[in-house]
Amino acid sequence: MSKIEVRRLNFDFSANTEKYWFNQSVFKTHLFNSITISAPEIEKYLILNVKKRINFLDNPQLKQQAQAFICQEGQHSYQHTKFWNNLRASGYKFDTFIRWGQTILFDILERQMSLNFNLAIAAGIEHLTTLIAEFALETDLFAEAEPELKQLFEWHALEELEHKTVLYDVLQNATNNYLLRQVGMFVAHILILLFLNLGLAILLYQDRKLFDRKVWQEFIEFWLTKDKFLYKALFNARDYLRKDFHPSQNDNLFLIDKVKV
C-alpha cells in the first residue's frame, strides 16, 4: 500500500475567476464543474461506508490507511464545495441536482442496500475516479486551466492515486464475493457517468449552450475520437473483471511527483 498523506489545503477562489476557466472551453469547464457539484456528496457516501466498516478491520495497517482515506476525502468534499459560491455568483442553479444525488446515494443505496453492496459500489467508484486522476495527470489535462482550479483538480487527482487501494481492500476485508464486486463496479460506473453528464447538461442548459455545435464537437472528441475516455473507461472496467485484480497492479504512482502542492 502506498503512503497516504493528509494535506490541509485551504482554497480561496477569486471572484474574478474566469467563467469558462478551462481555457475558455465551455464543454471542459462544465464537465469539471459537474465534478465539483457532484464530488462532495459522492465523497460523503464513500466516507460513510468506510466508517461503517472501519471498526471491523482486523488489519492495523489497513485501518490506518482507511482513517487517512476518510481525512483526504473529507478535504476533497469541503474544498470543492468552496467553488460553489463562484458558480452561484455566475447564476448557476444546481440545488435540485444535489438533492437528487443525495436521494440516490443515501435514501436508496445507503439505507436500502447492504453494507457489503455499498462497499462494492464505493470500490467501483474509486476504480473509475483513479482512472480519471491518472488520465488528468498523465496528459497534463489542466495545463491551460485557471491556476486555482488547476491546483484543486491536480491535488484531488494525486490523492486519488495515493489511496486507490483502500476501498478495494476494505471491501475484500469484508467479503471476497466476486459477483458482488462486479455488480458494484457496474452500478458505480452507471452512477458516475450519469452524474457527470447530467450535471454537464444542466449547466450547459443554463448557459443556453446545450445544443452548441462546438460543445458537441468537444464532447465527441473527449469521449470518443480524441481523448477516447469512454474506451479507456471500458478497458479499465475490463481489468476489474479479472479475478486476481488489485488496484496496486497499475503502476501509476509516479504521476504523484508531477504535482506540486
Image (cartoon, rainbow, N blue to C red):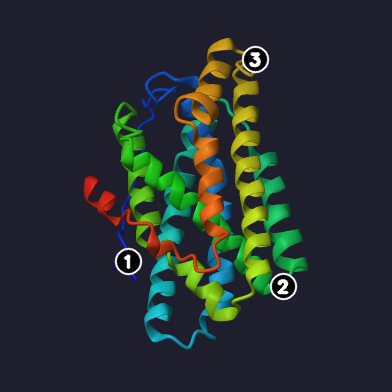
Q: Residue at x 45, y 59 (%)?
A: 73
Secondary structure of the residue carrying tag 2 is loop
Q: Neighbour class for label 3 at 10 Å: few (<14), some, many (≥20)?
A: few
| Precedes in sequence: disc 1 or disc 2 | 1
Q: Residue furthest bottom?
A: 58
Q: Which label sits on residue 211?
A: 3
Quadrant position of residue 121? bottom right
Q: Residue furthest top?
A: 213
Above or below residue 68? Residue 58 is: below
| Precedes in sequence: disc 3 or disc 2 | 2
Q: In front here: 134 or 75?
A: 134
Q: In front here: 225 or 9?
A: 225
Quadrant position of residue 17? top left
Q: Is residue 149 left or right of residue 209?
A: left
| Precedes in sequence: disc 1 or disc 3 | 1
Is the C-beta separation of discs 3 and 2 under 8 Å?
A: no
Give the amino acid at mark 2: Ser
Q: Which label sits on residue 139?
A: none
Q: Residue at x 53, y 80 (%)?
A: 173
Q: Neighbour class for label 1 at 10 Å: few (<14), some, many (≥20)?
A: many
Residue 40 visible to an observer of this rendering: no
Give the amino acid at mark 3: Phe
Q: Position of residue 161 (x, y in %)?
A: 37, 56
According to the picture, the residue beneath numbered tag 1 turns out to be 4
Q: Residue at x 33, y 56 (%)?
A: 251
Q: In front here: 69 or 162?
A: 162
Give the amino acid at mark 1: Ile
Q: Residue at x 70, y 40 (%)?
A: 96
Q: Which label sits on residue 114?
A: 2
Q: In front here: 99 or 47?
A: 47
